[in-house]
Image (tube, grey):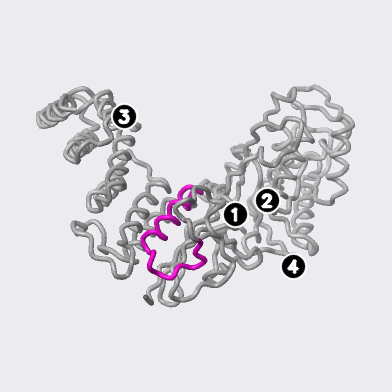
Amino acid sequence: KNEYSSLLILMVKIKECGIVPNKSTIRALLGLMNDLPSLDRESFIVLEELVIFSDLKHNSSELGFGSLDEKSKFEAYYRILEYYCDTWNLPEALSMFVRMQQSSSVKLESHHYVMILAMLAETGHLRKDAPSIEGLDGIYNNSAGPNLFNEIVAEMANTVDEIDPSCAVRLYKSFVMGFNDYPIHFYRPGHEMIDTIENVPISRCAAKRDELVACRVWLDKSTGKCPITETQQHIMPLSSNQRKIIHDDLFKLAKEEYNNSPDKKHKDSSDRALIELQKFSQWLAKKKDVSYTAIIDGANAAFYKHHLNNGEFNYRQLKFVVDALEAEDYKALVILPSKYVKPGFILSDGRRQRLNEEDLEIMNDIVSSRNLYVVPARCHDDLYCMLATVVQQKSKAQQYEDSFPVLVTNDRMNDHALEKIDPSLFQKWYDLNILMYRINHLGETSDAKRIQFFQPKRRAIQASEKDDAKIWHFPLKNRHERFVIRIPVLI
């Protein structure tokens, strides 16, 4: 340990000479922190100074060994912050956290914010009666209490859309610990033993005004209301004007794409493309018996990892995606080009594929389910998929967040035709509507757990107010599930 201390002192001298420590040196010091977890605070201060100095000088490689790479700087920042949080060194932790926010080399994620919030909750500094934290002048507008919590979470909401299950577990345990003398909504003894999200309490009843709320909740699927706080949650859809712009652009593109089709044997008017797209728009808008919450790009799903299936269209895989979505409470509409709703068809490489008996049975089941729309020949199925996300459905079964369904596809939608839509508007549409997926391995059974969906950025950490208290809802992986926190002000 004395040798390591001497090395740290030497590094301070090197820094004073204006030399940037290289990544090998910083990593050696990080290794030291693993080997000697009981390092004194002074050693951590030295390491912090080295890292900050390196970060400030990362464009000055001519001074010494060269600049520190992004990964090394991130590791150093994170380890220092973790140390301060674990030792409840509040001023230093908050100061380092703000420094991380200001650094171009660090991208803050949900667990970074939760680390800070958990420390403040555990130490009782988010309570209404909390003492001020010294040394926060110029760092935060509030020095303790619910307002400090609100200030940090508001910053978090600008960069984070949801929290991981492990973050919800830590928040729950930290708030129960720091508010142990408060009335806690839906409290269950043994919080110290909770280590999975499934064991975090989930409430379905309204909280009393003086109760601390820190638990899971399922929003009402029809209204989006939180049964605990009785507050409304919202999504972030495109505006009606933005939807109209995309709608109109898609019709213009439909005509152009039809005219540019390589199939020249047909002599019909290009108005056919507009007529067919209009038929689909009206069909979707007038459906009264069902509300589609997910549109599946059928060809994309069937050709997913097509190299594993000899480059062929895979109806079993398409069915797997449909079943997995229904297991997550989606109502899916499959959109397919007409060529794939036949016993045989020509693939893009010129080979002819003839569906086997199992694929034919699945195809017939999808057709008979009436949850399929067949795109006519020479019409661009991507345009139909996009249009389905901006057409207002009128079903009585409409759910609050499903007025405009997600589009299930891994297609980057970088088709040259779509480039004619305003790039910023297209990117916003993409971020709000695309539900990407990953299938790990299909095997012999269609186990829904083998598929992972990546939610679009419709959900967000949201604030609301009731009874003079601010309420925060943090989205979790399941689309209707939230972790909700309310610090009462009536105590």
What separation in Å lies between label 3 and label 2 (alpha carbons)? 41 Å
Contact? badges 3 and 4 (CB < 8 Å) = no
Horizontal and vertical percent position of residue 162: 49, 52
Q: Distance between the residues labelled 3 and 1?
A: 37 Å
In reply to whether residue 475 is colored magenta, the answer given is no
Instruction: Check disc 3 and give the amino acid type.
Output: Asp
Q: Categorize mark 4 by other alpha carbons within 10 Å: few (<14), some (14-19), many (20+).
A: few
Where is mark 2, residue-wise? 328
Q: Is mark 3 on a helix, strand or loop?
A: loop
- The residue nearer to you, when weighing 299 against 154, is 154
Front of the two marks 3 and 2: 2
N-terminal-most mark, 1 or 2: 2
Mark 2: few, some, or many residues within 10 Å (few <14, many ≥20)?
few
- Crowding around mark 3 (Cα neighbors within 10 Å: few <14, some 14 to 19, many 20+) is some
Q: Give the range drawn in magenta.
A: 163-188
Q: In this picture, is 399 found above or below 160? A: below
Q: Quadrant of residue 451?
A: top right
Residue under pointer 4: 396
Which quarter shows the N terminus? top left
Indicate whether residue 173 is drawn in magenta: yes
Query: What is the number of the mark on residue 69?
Result: 3
Q: Nearer the viewer, mark 2 or mark 4?
A: 2
C-beta proximity under 8 Å, tags 1 and 2: yes
Tag 2–tag 4 contact (CB < 8 Å): no
The residue located at (81%, 36%) in the rendering is 340
Q: Which mark sits nearer the N-terminus, 3 or 4?
A: 3
Residue in the foreground of this view, choosing between 475 and 161: 475
Q: Which residue lies furthest to the front in this view?
A: 190
